[in-house]
Amino acid sequence: MRTATKTRVTAETSIELSINLDTQTESTISTGVGFLDHMLTLFAKHSRITLNVNAIGDTYIDAHHTVEDIGITLGLCLKEALGDKAGINRYGSAYVPMDESLGFCALDLSGRSYLVFDAELTNPKLGDFDTELVEEFFQAAAFNSEMNLHLRVLYGKNTHHKIEALFKAFGRALREAITINPEIQGVNSTKGVL
């Protein structure tokens, strides 16, 4: 079973996060940031993983530290749970429509960190959530899991729909990439390591 659990405690946040890449059970997610709870819940559903998150952060300031630190912790858990990455597809991609919006994600579990984020989020806030934090979350997750992550909103009007399409596409692309393929012998790289 490919699992990992991490605790991250700073002066700004306290986060406990666990993942299971091979079994999907109901996730429990409590971040203190309602919109992020919603996005992580649907990410877990579409990636077909079990994700448990319990976070307490300085949300009386804003959600920045909480969102970023959850991204960091998720990335670290993904890296640990994947181990040597033997037998995985490595690459994944997905287009996801969400009503009038269309989101796209392509990723490579390459051991090299990079984020390309191409999304015009015209509404700066959804409730109390600053939409600029979406990029911060994905930056933290990509760099700490050591993946190449490309995200794009091709078109859309509603900011909630655009972000939801990205999180669902991320989940579906991740599921493709982490799936063990019996046709792959060892690590899917000519270098022999990922």
Image (cartoon, rainbow, N blue to C red):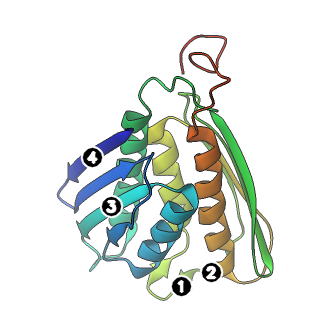
Is 128 in front, or is 50? 50
Spot occupied by residue 136 in the image (x, y as percentages of width and height):
50, 58
Nearer-N-terminus badge (4/3): 4
Q: Residue furthest front?
A: 182
Q: Is residue 17 above or below residue 57?
A: above
For mark 1, give the secondary structure: strand
Can residue 73 be seen here? yes
Q: Are marks 2 and 1 in contact (CB under 8 Å)?
A: yes
Q: Quadrant of residue 172?
A: bottom right
Q: Nearer the viewer, mark 1 or mark 3?
A: 3
Q: Label 1 is placed on what type of residue?
A: Leu
Q: CA distance from mark 2 to mark 4?
A: 30 Å
Residue appearing at x 48%, y 89% in the figure: 127
Is 2 in front, or is 98? 2
User: For residue 5, which numbered disc appears in the image?
Assistant: 4
Which residue is the site of mark 1? Answer: 126
Spot occupied by residue 64 in the image (x, y as percentages of width and height):
39, 67
Give left or right: position of 70 versus 175: left
For mark 4, give the secondary structure: strand
User: For residue 160, which numbered disc appears in the image?
Assistant: 2
Query: Split into 4 quadrants, where in the image is the C terminus?
Result: top right
Q: Label 3 is placed on what type of residue?
A: Asn
Give left or right: position of 66 versus 107: left
Give left or right: position of 102 versus 14: right
Q: CA distance from mark 1 to mark 3?
A: 24 Å
Residue appearing at x 52%, y 44% in the figure: 142
Q: Are marks 3 and 2 in contact (CB under 8 Å)?
A: no
Query: Crowding at label 1, few (<14), some or many (≥20) Cα neighbours within 10 Å?
Result: few
Q: Is residue 139 above or below residue 192?
A: below
